[in-house]
């Protein structure tokens, strides 16, 4: 479809999509996509548009406002807006862009993480980058009336957002810390049956205990102690479901120093005792 909006050139086109129930439940999904050229004087302000918007500035510049911040986007930049919040566009001299309105169950979580990493909604982007190519592919899919592969488009939107997140200065700087946490997680997976101290994990990761605790929680959402306990409980659940070993033996095999300590921790985590958990799973394989 061609736009009749004021200050949008007649050759500008856009396409609206109604996602399936499946897409709304589990995917990141497109709502509309287009390629617009705007003449000087274009202005638009919305209170809400119930979506998130990605667009790549092809040429020119535009002043953008979102979450009470005003920034100017220029050619070669990618923009990510929270259109659920008030937002506006203004261009004195004109601009052109490829754009995509999208949403999904994890869209807000992606947006929050990106804003935390950059504290900005503008990102420099090479036109040959995978993110730009994915944005173009989605637009071309609609323009050429190709069959819509919702899973494939969801994967492309995810790739765009991931490519932004991976380039964040803080994330780039913390790659060694991320690798240290991954190494520690693997170490816990191998040695959870034995006592593991914070000092031991930090030493394995080759960073200080204080810094290790901070980055471990950032990466996993748990303290090292909580992660060890969760690993032991998960393995105990597996043994309770798949073996006839006694509760005491399972406690020892999964790293607890006594059956009573294990039962207390298990009940706190699972809401039931190990024995009740085992009986409830005799005809069920869920966790």
Image (tube, rainbow, N blue to C red):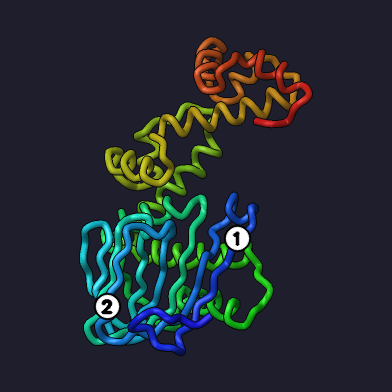
Question: In the rendered image, is residue 257 in sight?
Answer: no
Instruction: Check disc 1 and report its element: helix, strand or loop.
Output: loop
Q: Looking at the image, which residue is at 35% across and 81% down?
A: 6
Circle 2 sits in a helix, a strand or a loop, which is it?
strand
The residue identified by callout 1 is 19
Residue 277 drawn above or below residue 135: above
> Is 157 placed left or right of 209 in the picture?
right
**Residue visible at 57% across and 64% down?**
155
Q: Is residue 256 above or below residue 70?
A: above
Q: Is residue 76 above or below residue 218?
A: below
Viewport quadrant of the C terminus: top right
Quadrant for residue 184, please give it: top left
Q: Residue at x 36, y 44 (%)?
A: 218
In the image, what residue occupies the spot 22% across and 69% down?
A: 71
Where residue 141 sits: x, y (%)?
Answer: 60, 77
Q: Which mark is residue 98?
A: none
Other residues around mark 1 within 10 Å, as few (<14) / some (14–19) / many (≥20): some
Residue 147 image offset from top left, x and y in percent:
68, 73
The residue carrying pointer 2 sits among few (fewer than 14), some (14 to 19) or many (20 or more) residues within 10 Å by Cα, namely many
Choose the circle earlier in sequence order: 2 or 1.
1
Mark 2 lies on residue:
62
């Amino acid at each position: 479809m061609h736009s009749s909006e004021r200050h949008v050139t007649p050759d500008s086109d856009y396409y609206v999509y109604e996602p399936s129930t499946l897409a709304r439940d589990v995917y990141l999904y497109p709502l509309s996509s287009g390629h617009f050229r705007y003449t000087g004087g274009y202005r638009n302000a919305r209170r809400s548009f119930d979506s998130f918007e990605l667009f790549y500035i092809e040429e020119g510049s535009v002043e953008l406002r979102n979450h009470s911040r005003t920034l100017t986007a220029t050619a070669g930049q990618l923009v990510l807006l929270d259109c659920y919040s008030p937002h506006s566009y203004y261009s004195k001299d004109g601009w052109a862009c490829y754009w995509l309105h999208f949403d999904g169950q994890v869209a807000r979580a992606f947006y929050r993480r990106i804003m935390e990493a950059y504290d900005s909604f503008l990102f420099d982007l090479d036109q040959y980058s995978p993110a730009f190519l994915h944005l173009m592919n989605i637009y071309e899919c609609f323009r050429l009336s190709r069959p819509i592969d919702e899973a494939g488009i969801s994967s492309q939107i995810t790739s765009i957002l991931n490519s932004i997140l991976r380039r964040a200065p803080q994330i780039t700087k913390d790659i060694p810390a991320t690798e240290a946490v991954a190494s520690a997680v693997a170490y816990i997976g191998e040695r959870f049956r034995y006592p593991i101290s914070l000092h031991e994990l930090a030493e394995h990761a080759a960073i200080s205990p204080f810094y290790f605790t901070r980055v471990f929680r950032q990466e996993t959402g748990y303290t090292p102690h909580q992660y060890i306990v969760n690993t032991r409980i998960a393995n105990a659940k597996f043994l309770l479901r798949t073996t006839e070993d006694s509760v005491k033996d399972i406690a020892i095999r999964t790293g607890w120093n006594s059956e009573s300590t294990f039962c207390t921790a298990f009940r706190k985590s699972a809401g039931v005792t190990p024995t009740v958990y085992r009986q409830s799973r005799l005809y069920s394989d869920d966790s």
